[in-house]
Image: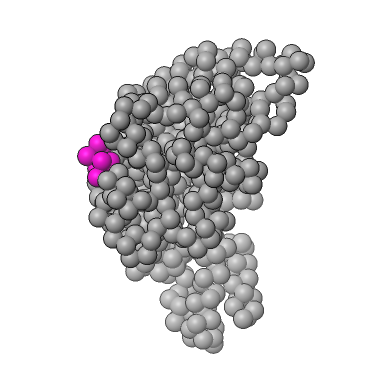
């Protein structure tokens, strides 16, 4: 059994040494087995080990390709950084606006008094504080999540502050919620393209992600029902508003259909609303349609800043204790300092002003994308901070990503979002939030020229691995 790992080690050395380049295609497994004098089953284990290490990606119907990798595992560092090419990072996606720190500082000043600092440096419970729960309930209400109707029949306001819990960030909120719902080996329905960190969280929790059939309106209700009846789902993970990476927002009719299916089959949902703040007067939270099943997760990293943030969960009333236990056991509670800062930023209008500025910035950057990538197939929303670029032939996602990095630009290949055995999309996601605007414009122009050139370097078959 160890032989296949030694073969994988040698291929890994070829990749690290540059003898196998990003985008190169490995031979079919049977050809590889014949060249190496090994059994086809052993070749399958070699390729599986390379996939597990993140060195190659398998594309259904096309083969196995060397992945575009990053130096030292640090996001956004181009392969050519060592040669002096400064990277433009269109992978990371944390919005910042001019004057942001000046806006945030006044609320923190009172916390630096010794008496106040002593209080906020103590541990915080998953339930936070009453002030924090009230502040977040108000924030979600102003974000278009209010006016939910419990069970679709009564006039109960939503969310109830008593159902709100806190974590260190939104990713921890997702992890805690899934941990409270899904046992190891349990199945979670997701869109075929989903948030990459959910894939990592599921792997650590031992969950199995099951892609649901979708159309231009979002997940198909009949697919949810058929998948669940085939082998029961423990939960769904959905991004109903500004789906990452496609920017799709599910419309009211489809939301109602999905809610009906979930109620009839009693399937819980984890609703990720991290980008929903970008849609002024947007759709009510999906969880408000099914409050007995919906678990909303959100946070302040995008609204405010990634360095001092909190995540929050709106749980069904009957599941607050279960989710609280998961937060506590995972060590995912928010810090008291961050909670108090959030209460102050929400209460004094700072978050509201930042949200308005970031909406304006996102719209402006989308106009730049429309100008610089005119003529290409780009899926996005006029107010989103990212764009899904379906690449022209002959480009594939990984080869284009590698070519972009050779020009000092980091983008995210479609393979990072793909779930299941469906064909890997020939697309990349462009994160528009982190790069300064002049750098963004230059990067978009460079990428457009690269795409039009159509010279998909490395797109041929790599024959040197046998």
Q: Is residue 104 left or right of residue 438?
A: right
- Splitting the image into 4 quarters, where does residue 270 fall? top left
Q: How many marks?
A: 0
Answer yes or no: is residue 259 visible.
Answer: yes
Q: 303 or 462, which lies in front?
A: 303
Q: Is residue 101 left or right of residue 34?
A: right
Q: 241 or 134, which lies in front?
A: 134
> Of all residues shown, which one is farthest toward the left?
253
Q: Residue at x 42, y 29 (%)?
A: 159
* Residue 73 placement (x, y as % from top left): 61, 50
* Residue 67 magenta-highlighted: no
* Residue 173 placement (x, y as % from top left): 53, 40
Up the image or down, 28 lies above or below 139; here it is: below
Q: Magenta part of the protein: which range?
A: 251-258
Colouring method of the image: one colour
* Residue 257 magenta-highlighted: yes
Q: Majority secondary structure of the magenta segment?
A: helix
Q: Residue at x 22, y 39 (%)?
A: 253
Answer yes or no: is residue 98 visible.
Answer: no
Q: 79 or 168, which lies in front?
A: 168
Q: Residue at x 61, y 61 (%)?
A: 16
Q: Is residue 466 left or right of residue 307?
A: left
Q: Residue at x 54, y 86 (%)?
A: 38
* Residue 287 placement (x, y as % from top left): 38, 38
- Splitting the image into 4 quarters, where does residue 380 fall? top left
């Amino acid at each position: 059994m160890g032989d296949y790992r030694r073969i994988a080690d040698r291929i890994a050395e070829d990749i690290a040494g540059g003898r196998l380049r990003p985008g190169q295609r490995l031979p079919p497994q049977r050809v590889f087995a014949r060249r190496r004098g090994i059994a086809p089953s052993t070749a399958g284990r070699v390729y599986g080990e390379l996939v597990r290490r993140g060195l190659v990606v398998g594309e259904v119907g096309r083969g196995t390709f060397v992945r575009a990798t990053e130096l030292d595992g640090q996001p956004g560092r181009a392969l050519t950084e060592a040669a002096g090419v400064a990277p433009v990072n269109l992978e990371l996606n944390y919005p910042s606006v001019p004057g942001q720190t000046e806006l945030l500082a006044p609320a923190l000043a009172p916390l630096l008094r010794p008496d106040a600092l002593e209080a906020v440096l103590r541990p915080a419970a998953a339930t936070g504080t009453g002030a924090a729960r009230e502040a977040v309930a108000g924030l979600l209400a102003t974000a278009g999540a209010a006016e939910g109707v419990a069970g679709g029949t009564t006039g109960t306001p939503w969310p109830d502050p008593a159902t709100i819990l806190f974590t260190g960030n939104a990713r921890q909120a997702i992890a805690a919620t899934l941990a409270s719902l899904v046992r190891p080996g349990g199945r979670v329905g997701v869109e075929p393209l989903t948030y990459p960190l959910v894939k990592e969280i599921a792997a650590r929790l031992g969950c199995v992600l099951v892609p649901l059939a979708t159309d231009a309106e979002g997940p198909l209700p009949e697919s949810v029902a058929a998948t669940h009846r085939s082998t029961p789902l423990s939960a769904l993970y959905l991004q109903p508003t500004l789906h990452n990476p496609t920017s799709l927002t599910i419309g009211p009719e489809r939301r109602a259909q999905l809610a009906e299916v979930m109620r009839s089959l009693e399937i819980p949902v984890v609703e990720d609303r991290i980008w929903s703040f970008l849609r002024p007067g947007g759709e009510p939270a999906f969880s408000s349609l099914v409050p007995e099943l919906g678990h909303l997760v959100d946070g302040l990293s995008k609204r405010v800043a990634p360095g001092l943030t909190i995540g929050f969960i709106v749980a069904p009333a009957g599941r607050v204790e279960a989710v609280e236990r998961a937060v506590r056991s995972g060590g995912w509670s928010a810090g008291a300092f961050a909670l108090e800062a959030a209460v102050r930023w929400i209460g004094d209008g700072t978050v509201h002003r930042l949200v308005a500025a970031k909406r304006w910035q996102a719209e402006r950057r989308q106009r730049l994308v429309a100008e610089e990538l005119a003529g290409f197939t780009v899926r996005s929303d006029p107010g989103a901070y990212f764009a899904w670029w379906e690449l022209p032939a002959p480009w594939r996602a990984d080869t284009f990503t590698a070519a972009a990095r050779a020009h000092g630009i980091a983008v995210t290949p479609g393979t990072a979002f793909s779930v299941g055995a469906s064909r890997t999309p020939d697309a990349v996601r462009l994160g528009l939030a982190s790069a300064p605007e002049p750098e963004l414009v230059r990067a978009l122009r460079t990428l457009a020229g690269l795409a039009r050139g159509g010279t998909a370097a490395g797109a041929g078959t790599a024959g040197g691995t046998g």
